[in-house]
């Protein structure tokens, strides 16, 4: 299994490479970055630990290193400038992503491979990757709300003083402000969340709001997220590499589930060696379904602005 990480010299890309090295599932890691020295340094640093971690082949290269890759993880992206509008940042990242897609096309990745988009705005860029026709739509996945779900479960476990790995709680929709918490199925090892001692709805809502804002909080405190993102990415990569048929809230092209079409967002998705291997239509509360549809509408509006080249 070969994984190429575009943006591998950055915080998220580097942490992802480290997580995959420790996981031992990936045999070959290609680190690609616009800053060639950062890519070389990251690859060298990882190789220094290979004798005590795994026997992967780890190296730096240009886009040609995508050739034969089974999974291409795209973490490369630009950060928001002071006082910059969200749409302006989106437009700058869209332009960068167009360049990445063009270079990717030339590199001849494994035709049965999968593109995993991590860079933000992840749902918009995942849609662009689908429309680039490098791979069929089912072989294009966005990290979507896997990270948000990971954060949500961790916060809930922390608050209720339970093992966070036993917390089952989903966030679906946009990886952004319109994300949707699925309270109707939230549970701890099968026990509904609202049955836990001390449960209060206002506290649960506050935990979700902390989840929604936690990315910005990490940026404020340390300049950007990396570790938890890498853990989330590893979960998706492992699902593909090991053909786990894992049910994950990844972003993919929607074709009618919940009445949502022609946009990429997160719904419960079977993930295996073929990428997206099916979606699951959950039984949701009416307000959850409406919120999910509203999230799709928000993304469609943003897509319309981006595709029309709306001035920032």
Image: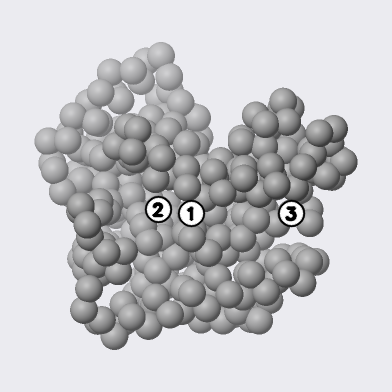
Q: Please tell me how crowded label 1 is: few (under 14), some (14-19), or many (20+) other residues with Cα within 10 Å.
A: many
Distance of label 3 from label 1 (alpha carbons): 21 Å
Depth check, mark 2 against mark 3: the one in front is: 3
Q: Please tell me how crowded label 2 is: few (under 14), some (14-19), or many (20+) other residues with Cα within 10 Å.
A: many
Q: Are marks 2 and 1 in contact (CB under 8 Å)?
A: yes
Residue underneath mark 3: 183
At horizontal 25% and vertical 35% (from top left) the residue drawn is 59
- Work out whether 50 lies above or below 60: above
User: Residue extending furthest bottom?
Assistant: 308
Q: Earlier in the sequence, mark 3 or mark 1?
A: 1
At horizontal 52% and vertical 78% (from top left) the residue drawn is 297
Residue 95 in which image quadrant: bottom left
Q: Earlier in the sequence, mark 2 or mark 1?
A: 2
User: Residue extending furthest front?
Assistant: 202
At horizontal 38% and vertical 30% (from top left) the residue drawn is 18
Residue underneath mark 2: 118
Residue 76 position, x and y percent, is 28, 51
Q: Are marks 3 and 1 in contact (CB under 8 Å)?
A: no
Residue underneath mark 1: 143
Q: Please tell me how crowded label 3 is: few (under 14), some (14-19), or many (20+) other residues with Cα within 10 Å.
A: some
SS assignment at label 3: strand
SS assignment at label 2: loop
Q: Is residue 231 visible?
A: yes
SS assignment at label 1: loop
Depth check, mark 3 against mark 1: the one in front is: 3
State the residue in front, 293 or 146.
293
Give the quarter of the figure containing the N terminus: top left
Compared across the picture, whether 159 is left or right of 301 comes to right
């Amino acid at each position: 299994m070969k994984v190429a990480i575009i943006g591998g010299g950055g915080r998220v890309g580097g942490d992802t490479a480290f997580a995959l090295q420790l996981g031992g599932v990936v045999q070959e890691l290609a680190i690609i970055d616009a800053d060639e020295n950062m890519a070389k340094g990251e690859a060298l640093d990882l190789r220094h630990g290979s004798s005590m971690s795994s026997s992967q082949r780890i190296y730096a290269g240009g886009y040609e290193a995508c050739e034969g890759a089974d999974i291409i993880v795209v973490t490369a992206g630009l950060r928001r400038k002071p006082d910059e509008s969200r749409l302006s940042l989106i437009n700058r990242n869209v332009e960068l992503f167009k360049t990445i897609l063009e270079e990717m096309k030339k590199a001849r990745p494994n035709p049965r491979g999968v593109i995993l988009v991590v860079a933000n705005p992840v749902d918009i860029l995942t849609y662009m990757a689908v429309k680039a026709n490098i791979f069929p739509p089912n072989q294009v996945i966005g990290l979507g709300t896997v990270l948000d779900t990971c954060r949500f479960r961790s916060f809930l476990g922390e608050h209720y003083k339970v093992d966070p790995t036993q917390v089952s709680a989903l966030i679906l929709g946009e990886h952004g402000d319109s994300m949707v918490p699925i309270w109707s199925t939230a549970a701890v090892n099968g026990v509904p969340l609202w049955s836990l001692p001390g449960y209060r709805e206002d506290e649960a809502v506050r935990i979700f709001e902390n989840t929604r804002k936690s990315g910005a909080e990490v940026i404020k405190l340390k300049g950007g997220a990396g570790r938890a993102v890498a853990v989330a990415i590893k979960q998706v990569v492992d699902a593909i590499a090991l053909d786990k048929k894992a049910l994950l809230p990844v972003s993919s092209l929607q074709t009618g589930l919940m009445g949502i079409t022609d946009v990429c967002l997160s719904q419960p998705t079977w993930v295996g060696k073929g990428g997206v291997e099916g979606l699951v239509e959950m039984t949701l509360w009416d307000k959850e379904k409406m919120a999910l549809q509203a999230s799709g509408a928000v993304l469609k509006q943003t897509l319309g602005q981006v595709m029309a080249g709306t001035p920032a």
